Image (tube, rainbow, N blue to C red):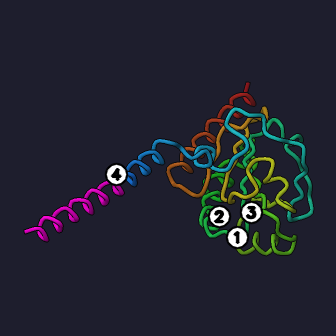
Amino acid sequence: MKAFTKLTYTFHIAALLILATFTAQAQQIANNAATPNPADADRGYLVKVGDQAPDDFELVLQNGKKTSLKQLRGKTVILQFTASWCSVCRKEMPHLETDVWKAYQNKNVVLIGVDRDEPLEKVQNFHHDMQITYPLALDPGADIFGRFANKKSGVTRNVVIDPSGKIVYLTRLYDEKEFGQMVQVIDRLANQSSLKASL
């Protein structure tokens, strides 16, 4: 009988220890869920919607031409941060070509892919391989990228900048719903530009 009581007592202690461990783990999971990760909130961006877009840089395109956000002021500009090694970028780019560039290039909208830290020849080959007609800009050292997002964060980002130079939409990765919302923002800006031009 004594052995049975000892076994029962040991079993109860073990059950309490297991229960305490599960309770502590559940509490930790609940705390993690309740505390938002700051990296998730900004998705690696250093800028936010409503900010004036950084414009202290020059965009050198794959064809040798140069431009800047200052020169493009008065137009809606989409900077697409990309790289040849990025599979998600490759998935998104045909949609940018048809749904943004082809649809709005004659409506005061400029789309420029900003290729993260790759040499000219690789960027030119990437442009050719993707069969896109919108330009790609070089970004040695990811210096342009680093003005908009933490350099440790990933590419596949779109920054939509209105004609006054203000950031109006940010995307991360390729999500069809978010991409569709971005196109709606671009469409609204393009229509506003067309209306102003006709007045």
Which residues fall within the magenta stretch? Answer: 1-23
Do the CB atoms of the residues marked 4 and 1 lie less than 8 Å apart?
A: no
At x 67% / y 54%, what residue is drawn?
157
Q: Earlier in the sequence, mark 3 or mark 4?
A: 4
Q: Earlier in the sequence, mark 3 or mark 2?
A: 2
Q: Secondary structure at mark 1?
A: loop
> What amino acid type should be assigned to the residue bearing mark 2?
Cys
Q: Position of residue 89 (x, y in %)?
A: 65, 64
> What amino acid type should be assigned to the residue bearing mark 4?
Thr
Residue 37 in magenta stretch: no
**The one of 18 and 80 positioned closer to us in this rendering:** 18
At x 73% / y 24%, what residue is drawn?
199
Residue to which mark 4 is pinned: 23
Q: Position of residue 105 (x, y in %)?
A: 72, 49
Do the CB atoms of the residues marked 3 and 2 lie less than 8 Å apart?
A: no
Residue to which mark 1 is pinned: 131
Q: Earlier in the sequence, mark 1 or mark 2?
A: 2
**Labels 4, 1: front one:** 4
Badge 3 local density, few (<14 within 10 Å), some, or many (20+)? few
Residue to which mark 3 is pinned: 133
> What amino acid type should be assigned to the residue bearing mark 1?
Gln
> Is 64 placed above or below 195 here?
below
Q: Earlier in the sequence, mark 4 or mark 2?
A: 4
Dominant SS of magenta comes to: helix
Question: For residue 89, which numbered disc appears in the image?
Answer: 2
Do the CB atoms of the residues marked 3 and 4 lie less than 8 Å apart?
A: no
Q: Position of residue 40 (x, y in %)?
A: 58, 48
Q: Distance of mark 1 from mark 3, alpha carbons?
A: 7 Å
> What amino acid type should be assigned to the residue bearing mark 3?
Thr
Badge 2 local density, few (<14 within 10 Å), some, or many (20+)? many
